[in-house]
Image (cartoon, helix red, strand yellow):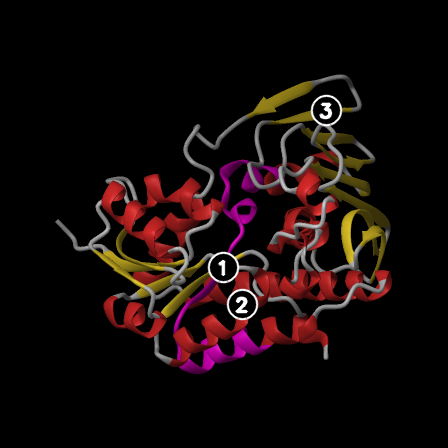
Amino acid sequence: MEQKMKLGILGTGMIVKEFLPWLAGADSPFQVQALCSTQRSAPLAAELCARYHVPQCTTNYLELLQWVDVVYLAVPNLQHTRYAKVALEAGKHVIVEKPMAPTAAQTEELAALSRHKRVFLFEALTTQYLENYHKIRELLPRIGTVKLVQCNFSQYSSRYDAFCAGQVAPSFDPNCAGGALMDLNVYNISYIVGLFGEPNRVNYAANIDHGIDTSGILTMDYSGFKAVSMAAKDCGAPARYVIQGTKGYLLQKSTANYCGGLTLHLNDGKEEHYNLNGGRPRLAAEFEAFARAIEGGDQELCSRMLDTSIAVSRVLTAARRSAGIRFPCDQ
């Protein structure tokens, strides 16, 4: 049996707890070799390693890099760039949780470094790799000329009440590059940019509390059509994604990170329903794509996805600037 590449994970947060059961299982394209945590989270890391049969555990990032072929970074947004640079410099392939980096300049720097080192760098943003998302791209010509795009990813955060009481988690902390734009709206932006490319102009109207956006509306101006992207951590609403064209529209009623079933509505009244994701964990498609690309040396895929990540990062940076939201790395 072909040996799997060894994957090291940096972080023990919610995303790791969600993904580790599948990543460490028989269906994963990687062998999860090691988990790296802070000293404070070391007991949790040891517990996760024992539960999912991960061979090695450490609080030393450089030690982790010695054990693995690929590193998956699942740490607060502001830490993405420095940990990715160390791994890329060491010649390791890198998978970074979304967003790739807090600023467009940092994303471009990481992309340039990965290309120089000839190692793979991927942004772990599930939307781009899901089968339903590929179906949307296939169906787009059938709705005619696109005129309007609407996206809404709004969830009342389990940490919002604590935030209001003065307990600030990284996802609400400007010093950690948090906020609704970077946490949730990034999925909407990737959804739109992956289909239509980088917009001509963006503007972000945000609800700001303690220097961070807890919700907001992003408008993206394209040649010939407009896109509106809403995201909220301070209130909830049903997910709704609509791409409207002159011959019909595409509708999804699930958030972009799951990109669930979709319906094609044509102007003549015909409807077609699709759901191709197969009921697997939402990260399965992306990690399988990462493994195929790395093992097959598919630099073309990596380069194309990096270009998308750069475009998304430019939108995020321009949106923050328009709303007056600043991070420490903006200095």
Quadrant assignment for the C terminus:
bottom right
Question: Was residue 283 drawn as part of the magenta stretch in this picture?
Answer: no
Which residue is label 3 attached to?
A: 265
Which residue is label 1 attached to?
A: 75
Tell me which segment is drawn in magenta.
109-136
Going by the numbered disc 2, the residue's amino acid type is: Gln
Task: Look at the image and tell me whether residue 287 can be seen.
Answer: yes
Which residue is label 2 attached to?
A: 79
- Label 1: how many residues lie within 10 Å, few (<14), some (14-19) or many (20+)? many
Question: In the image, is residue 59 above or below residue 169?
Answer: below
- Is residue 190 or residue 197 the one in the foreground? 190
Query: How far from the left and from the top, in percent, is residue 299?
Result: 42, 68
Query: How far from the left and from the top, in percent, is residue 153?
Result: 70, 38
Question: Was residue 111 drawn as part of the magenta stretch in this picture?
Answer: yes
Q: Nearer the viewer, mark 2 or mark 3?
A: 2
Question: In the image, is residue 229 above or below residue 309?
Answer: above
- Label 3: how many residues lie within 10 Å, few (<14), some (14-19) or many (20+)? some
- Is residue 28 or residue 213 the one in the foreground? 213
- Residue 14 is left or right of residue 4, and the answer is right
- Secondary structure under tag 3 reads strand
Query: How far from the left and from the top, in percent, is residue 230?
Result: 77, 43
Going by the numbered disc 1, the residue's amino acid type is: Val
- Disc ID at residue 61: none
- Is residue 50 or residue 107 the one in the foreground? 50
Q: CA distance from mark 2 to mark 1?
A: 6 Å
Disc 2 and disc 1 in contact, CB within 8 angstroms: yes
Q: Earlier in the sequence, mark 2 or mark 3?
A: 2
Q: Could you tell me what secondary structure mostly forms the magenta stretch?
A: helix
Badge count: 3
